[in-house]
Image (cartoon, rainbow, N blue to C red):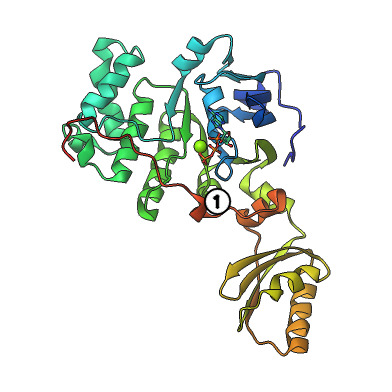
Amino acid sequence: MSAATNAPPALNGNCGGKPVAIEVQHIVKRYGDFEAVKDVNFCVAEGEIFGLLGPNGAGKSTLIRMMTTLIPVTAGRALVAGHDVSEDPDDVRRMIGVIPQALTSDQDLTLEENLLIYAKLYGVPREQRKKNIDAVLEAVDLTKWRDAQTKTLSGGMRRRLEIARGLVHNPRIFFLDEPTTGLDPVSRIAVWEMLDKLKTSRNLTMLLTTHYMEEADKLCDRIAIVDHGNLVALGTPVELKNSVAGANVVEVHFDREDDEWQGRLEKIEDVTSVVPEGSGFYRVITKSGSKTTMQIVELAASLGETLTSLSVQNTTLDDVFIHYTGRQLRDEQVKPVFMMPPRPGAQP
Ligand SMILES: Nc1ncnc2c1ncn2[C@@H]1O[C@H](COP(=O)(O)OP(=O)(O)OP(=O)(O)O)[C@@H](O)[C@H]1O
Ligand SMILES: [Mg+2]
């Protein structure tokens, strides 16, 4: 685990001993006086699935937009497949596929028509286009829908179409901005499985953003936690969890909800943070699970309060996030997925 902002980036074409696919060095993005991305460094190795995990407004999309040449870099630099995004944007674009945060396929066109537009846009030779479209439709399991209008697809199928669209020119590096936001849990898992399969079958490097802990944990080889434009921690899911080791999580439920509990629990020795979960439930992060458990029991007894449950849990990525940011990352912070409005005159 290399924690923190000022860790030097891997240089000389390697990232942790593997060939490097993406290298970000001291990158900054300013909008006027506001710094949306602050001196961020990381590298992504070839064949890796790398996750940027952070809450709304953390700077995830801004980072992706800089790496994919959509917005200029204010300071620092990013190298994608060996090309500098500021100096050689065309070379970068040839190597990458991008799925933006918003769903942008034209709803009135068929799947095949949507894919064809992108194949042309990305300069896929005419004789190659049908072959590529067949292959990507097959890869995302949408072959039988090729002539359907896009607006007839479910949310999960539309995401899969976007994935197909991002791959139609056979890129080496795939950028996905929140690939599963707004999907139901079943469709989300289907997309994870698909991405994992595509990584292997197409020999892809992937960089994705997410605010789903489970997504980062299950799908990503390594995760960078981003908060307020800073990279606050970087490592494999296991490394990140171990980095807050020594930390235990005690889950406690009091019979009676009382505003005082948060403050009382925070005052207990060894407790580093307390997360209220509602209805009398608290998640207490502590350096000593056993000692804190005893102290909570004693405290409740001395106050004549009843504990309905008490258990010591393993560290999760949630705890890692709280440890590094001091805040909780919860799914309800997620904004609804933005959909492109239908074109004027289109049937609803
Ligand atoms: N064009 C812009 N002008 C000014 N501020 C901007 C602009 N684009 C983004 N920002 C600000 O930069 C910060 C980072 O935004 P960004 O979209 O990168 O966050 P994010 O991590 O992708 O969030 P979300 O999870 O909501 O997509 C936010 O505070 C946002 O308001
Ligand atoms: Mg975003």
Looking at the picture, tell me which residue is in the foreground, 206 or 302: 302
Residue under numbered circle 1: 213
Identity of the amino acid at label 1?
Met
On screen, residue 30 versus residue 244, left or right, reads: left
Name the residue furthest right.
269
Q: Residue at x 71, y 75 (%)?
A: 260
**235 sits left or right of 137 in the view:** right
Q: Quadrant of the rendered structure where residue 339 is?
A: top left
Q: Is residue 263 above or below residue 155?
A: below
Where is the N terminus found, in terms of image quarters? top right
Nearer to me, 41 or 280:
280
Residue 298 visible in the current orientation: yes
Residue 124 horizontal/vertical position (percent): 32, 13
Instruction: Report x, y in % for residue 178.
Output: 46, 40
Point 55% across, 49% down: residue: 217
The foreground one among 57 and 292 is 57
Q: Image point 68% across, 48% down: which residue?
A: 240
Q: Quick check: which quadrant has ligand 1?
A: top right
The quarter of the displayed image where residue 202 is located: top left
